[in-house]
Image (cartoon, rainbow, N blue to C red):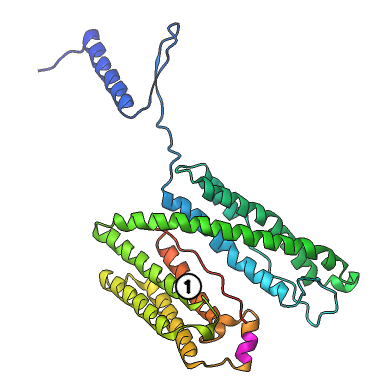
Amino acid sequence: MKYSSSPIRNFLFAGVILVGIILFAIKNGNLEINPDPESPHITVQAPKKSTEVPVTEKLNAYTFGINRMALRAHESYARYDSWVDIETGPTGKERHIYGLYELYELEPIKARFEKVKTQSPQLPELEQAGDAYITSLLSLVELVRGAKDYYDQKDYLDDGMATGKTLHPGLVESFEAYFIAEKKLRARLAHYQGERKEALLAEADTEETRLFAQGMRSMDLTTALLEQAISEELFSLDAANLSDGIEKAQGAWDKLGEMTPSNTLGYAEDPAKDFIKSAKEVMRRARDQQAFSQSEALLLQGNGAWMVEGSQGRLVNSYNQLVSAYNSANPDGLHWLKVIPPKSK
């Protein structure tokens, strides 16, 4: 049987559709009612974009800022310090003039900091430390770029090192300001990361989250081992305590491997093995009191510690490679901070 349409039927049908739209809008919080009696109307707005971001994403943005710049900044300063008397500045009479390393671009860091700063949850102490970090970098990046160009072009041969002498005080001051800002940001970030790790571990109630939790435990024990291994001068380290730390870290990675489907731990398996190997080399050198050779000592005084077996610099380098692999493979997980190698003595 066919039903013929009528104005009344169409009116009722349209009314039902309108009521449905209004109810949907009310449910989703997108209903705006104009209280003006002279111009009453109802507007269904587009859903408002949330400004909230997962706390892990916010913490990772600040971790990115440190991991991208800190190691390079310390290396650049060490390069400068290797040939300049920091107290008096360059003279032009140095045996070798190496200049210093250029720093990476600041914009990617600045963009990520600005993005998460305006998003919830608000973490004022962390955000303020992040602002100070960026401020310290603004001057440092420009000063280092100018100084690097000056030394790379060997312009000191033309002006008798006049520009180098002028640049020196501001350069050292900017490096020191950056190191202070970096230290404060690391401290605030470590505080919030600790809280977040506790929360994530408490929430690990599924196979997937338990796997992530074991990954965090593995990184925690690895970090604890590293901190123990660089806590004091190498030949003063307690080899027995190092062996215990190595066993715990190795056990954690082995357990993670057992929990992980075959061939899916590759992102961290090799870097983790390299770190454990480097830790054993440090432990053995401390245990056997094996002095560094003359060639090894020369590498340690420069930027070649990562090439010296049994050195703390090599261990830190192995750790930082593991951090890079772990962070890259866990884009939505909590990221780890890279570590600055201790100065060789």
Please state which of residues 131 and 23 is positioned toward the viewer in this rendering.
131
View extreme (top): residue: 38
In the image, residue 31 sits, relative to residue 344, either above or below, namely: above
Please state which of residues 45 and 248 is positioned toward the viewer in this rendering.
248
Image quadrant holding the N terminus, namely top left
Is residue 246 in sight in this rendering?
Answer: yes
Image quadrant holding the C terminus, namely bottom right
- Residue at 52% x, 41% y is 118
In the image, residue 20 sits, relative to residue 173, either above or below, namely: above
The answer to which image quadrant residue 245 occupies is: bottom left
- Residue at 52% x, 58% y is 187
View extreme (right): residue: 159
In the image, residue 343 sits, relative to residue 206, either above or below, namely: below
Q: Main secondary structure of the magenta part?
A: helix
Q: Is residue 68 left or right of residue 15?
A: right
In the image, residue 204 sits, relative to residue 256, either above or below, namely: above
Residue 20 image position (x, y, % from top left): 27, 22
Residue 71 image position (x, y, % from top left): 59, 68
Asked if the magenta segment contains residue 249, the reply would be no
Amino acid under disc 1 = Glu
Q: How many marks?
A: 1
Label 1 sits on residue:
227
Determine crowd level at label 1: few under 14, some 14-19, many 20+ residues with C-alpha closer than 10 A.
Answer: few
Asked if the magenta segment contains residue 296, the reply would be yes
The answer to which image quadrant residue 105 occupies is: bottom right
What segment is highlighted magenta in the picture? Answer: 295-299
